Amino acid sequence: MAETPKISLVRGVAEVREQVARARAAGKSIGLVPTMGALHAGHVELIRRCRADSDFVVVSVFVNPTQFGPTEDFTKYPRTLDADLAACELGGADVVFAPLAEAIYPRGTAETTFVDVPGVTARLEGASRPGHFRGVATVVMKLLNLVGPDLAHFGRKDYQQLLVVRRMVADLDVPVRIVGVDTVREADGLAMSSRNRYLNVEERRAAVVLSRALGLAMEATQSGERRADRVRQILVEEIESEGLAKLDYAEVADAETLEPLATLGEGREAVALLAVRVGPARLIDNAILPGTRRDAADAAEK
């Protein structure tokens, strides 16, 4: 078995393009894993999946200022590049692209061209965090243009983000396959997230309420519950039972459009989505509800 090559850290646009061009010239397929750093085991799994699907793996590490609102945690967001490099090497990445903001936004964020994806951005995270998905879509498009990958891997924990990116590449005819990778969880069910490190011991214990609520919703639909309002009620009641948790939203929606559903089944795959604040951290999680049709695009990735 060939040894994984030593990982390379690059900062500039010309450097990452040169590395990718060299790999292309050698006949290698290119994979991209976009991240904001503060990597954990979930990111390592993303990188490993990308490594299994492609010959040459680029991981971007960039805390993107345009996807943070004015009251959000941009300045406090953890920046752990040395640890991130170790995680990328563990996952099997070839290159870590960690640009400075001026490399991504050479004219500054106020003067840059933005990408807007209508429809799927209007609800949930889009409603709670105005402008968030404009920043996400813009930076992802820039990374896709800079790296030119054959595949790009995204975690399903950020479910709405995955839909936004898929819609963007379809609408703009970007020649890349977007691969969704299942959420990696702690032993107690909490979805791994860079923001989990904000939690103290009691808040960390309380945060498990998200996965617990989703589990109850899944049990209900598995047992035959088809009233979406009842499933939403199950989610809300469980979150509200935890005193340290403050609900932002609990929704049961069409898994492809995120339109709220009235009835489950009827040939439409359904997803339950949560956003909950626990202490200083705003956490999100989701689950596809049993008994509903799986998205053919996701099924094709398996």
Image (cartoon, rainbow, N blue to C red):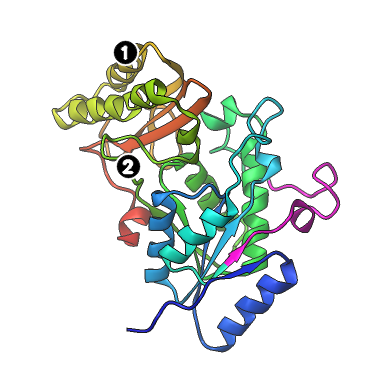
Identity of the residue drawn at 59% across and 54% down? 81
Query: Magenta span: helix, strand or loop, mainly?
Result: loop
Q: Are marks 2 and 1 in contact (CB under 8 Å)?
A: no
Quarter of the image where the C terminus is located: bottom left
Instruction: Check disc 1 and report the residue beneath it.
Output: 237
Q: Residue 213 colored magenta?
A: no
Quarter of the image where the N terminus is located: bottom left
Q: Residue 106 colored magenta?
A: yes
Q: Which residues are magenta?
A: 96-115
| Residue toward you, 232 or 285 | 285
> Would you call the spot at circle 2 few (<14 residues within 10 Å), some (14-19), or many (20 or more)?
some
Instruction: Check disc 2 and report the residue beneath it.
Output: 185
CA distance for labels 2 and 1 = 23 Å
x and y, in percent, of residue 41 in the image: 39, 51
x and y, in percent, of residue 118 in the image: 61, 40
Label 1 SS: helix
Nearer to us of marks 2 and 1 is 2
> Would you call the spot at circle 1 few (<14 residues within 10 Å), some (14-19), or many (20 or more)?
few
**In which image quadrant can residue 275 be found?**
top left
Q: Is residue 6 left or right of residue 142?
A: left
x and y, in percent, of residue 181 in the image: 38, 53
